Amino acid sequence: MQLNSGEDVGRNVSAAAALGREAAAAGAALVVMPENALYMGAEEGRAEVAGRYALGEAPGGACGEAMAALSRETGAWVLWGGVPEARSEDARTFNTAALLDPAGVVVARYRKIHLFDIDLPGGPVLTESRNTAPGDALVVADTPVGRLGLSVCYDVRFPELYRGLVDGGATVLAVPAAFTATTGRAHWELLLRARAVESQAYVLAAAQWGTHPGGRTTWGHAMIVDPWGVVVAERAEGEGFALADIDPERIAGVRASLPSLAHRRIGRHP
């Protein structure tokens, strides 16, 4: 999925749900929403959004009910990438990827581990950790398209996370993201294809695209990459979705013919 989310949560939910229905009608068994699908604005506003979205066994609150309704209406599994989840410890939220089954039940949640604190020359200064707390657990879940390993955006720069997901049985990797235009132009496709090749897994990369409140721009180019590193579907610009079949035989064939996962040897420092 590719969205252009902003501060209007109602508009964001409606746009995501409309595209989710289109994707499901086109045959998608799993719909992957990008990071910040519910809200993309000032980081200070995330806590207020989290109050409208409660992540329990079934989502509560206005946002959560709309999320669950999409799954129930379409019969699709839906991964809502990077939604704010309230914490009891302090005002910071988690950046949580929530996987809902066709009954609208949350069957897995992954809290983003690597937070985006950057100061790019000529680019944006972003400090995600100011209002977001990091997670600390890897998450893999069974879905109709395969065993799904969860991650969010900046995680894609840390290959050891994906190796851990593959060790947990992942054959498909989800990367919901809101990549900046600056980093996306240089690294987005490169990183996604690298994670697919080294993991010998499909990569499902949902994206934010365009200009958002505060002048932040995101790269878009939502894509699906196969285990050989081939981009099999892409939505370059605008809101929409990329759709492709996930072929278990393709995964098995790549892993059997080039068994690099079985050849791993970890050296030690002297």
Image (cartoon, helix red, strand yellow):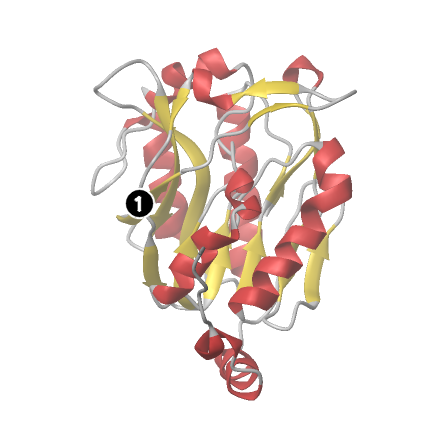
Task: Residue 99: give x, y in percent of width and height.
Answer: 36, 49
Residue nearer the viewer, 183 or 34: 183
Write down the quadrant of residue 47 in the picture: top left
Residue at the image point whose x is 34% and y is 50% from the top: 138
- Three-letter amino acid code of the residue under disc 1: Ala
Does 87 appear above or below 146? Answer: above
**Residue 242 visible, this orientation:** no
Q: Return the residue at label 1.
A: 137
Does 229 appear above or below 187? Answer: below
Q: Residues within 10 Å of mark 1 (few under 14, many from 20)?
A: few
Write down the quadrant of residue 134 in the picture: top left
Circle 1 sits in a helix, a strand or a loop, which is it? loop
Q: Is residue 98 left or right of residue 241?
A: left
Q: Is residue 175 left or right of residue 59?
A: right
**Residue 43 visible, this orientation:** yes
Q: Quadrant of the C terminus?
A: bottom left
Task: Residue 127: give x, y in percent of width and height.
Answer: 53, 19
Write down the quadrant of residue 177 in the picture: top right
Residue nearer the viewer, 11 or 183: 183
